[in-house]
Amino acid sequence: MVSEVTEGVRVSVLTEYQPEYSNPVKSHFVFTYKITIENRSTQTVQLMRRHWHVFDSNYKYYEVEGEGVVGQQPILEPGEVHEYVSGCNLSSGLGKMKGTYLMERLVDGYTFRVVIPEFILAAPYILN
């Protein structure tokens, strides 16, 4: 698991390879990642947008941007935690992701970017 704190918001990521949905012969590798967002600040915040950078080891790169996460724009009071699971398809068994969340402090409308720490997506046999 990797974690990073930005302006009192902690983001942690745990990844898992999904062999039952992958087909290495056809260059199709499926990964899931569980994100835990913890508001350690003293202010209520809302996750407004996401921006991902996805790198595949076969030199493919793309970005994903949009509102919220998995259809939600969660509001986190101080001390609250929001978790969700999402996924990523790669054409190789090795890649990485990183990104940011655009958060808004509800008391005054201040917006800031929270770092999603870089994490590795690796089929278990790739690193042997």
Image (tube, rainbow, N blue to C red):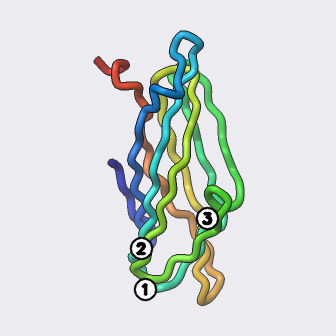
Is 21 situated above or below 46?
A: above
Q: Secondary structure at mark 2?
A: loop
Q: Which mark is residue 8?
A: 2
Relative to residue 119, is residue 111 drawn left or right? right
Q: Residue at x 69, y 50 (%)?
A: 65
Outermost residue on the front side: it is: 20
Outermost residue on the bottom side: it is: 107
Q: Which mark is residue 102?
A: 3
Is 42 situated above or below 73?
A: below
Give me the C-alpha separation between circle 3 and circle 2: 14 Å
Q: Amino acid at mark 2?
A: Gly
Q: Residues within 10 Å of mark 3 (few under 14, many from 20)?
A: some
Q: Secondary structure at mark 3?
A: strand
Outermost residue on the right side: it is: 66
Q: Which of the two discs, 3 and 2, labels the residue nearer the N terminus?
A: 2
Q: Amino acid at mark 1?
A: Thr
Q: Which of the two discs, 2 and 1, labels the residue nearer the N terminus?
A: 2
Q: Residues within 10 Å of mark 2 (few under 14, many from 20)?
A: some
Q: Amino acid at mark 3?
A: Leu
Query: Is disc 3 in contact with disc 2, using a CB cutoff of under 8 Å?
Result: no
Q: Residue at x 41, y 25 (%)?
A: 123
Q: Which of the two discs, 3 and 1, labels the residue nearer the N terminus?
A: 1
Q: Residue at x 41, y 28 (%)?
A: 122
Query: Is disc 2 in contact with disc 1, using a CB cutoff of under 8 Å?
Result: yes
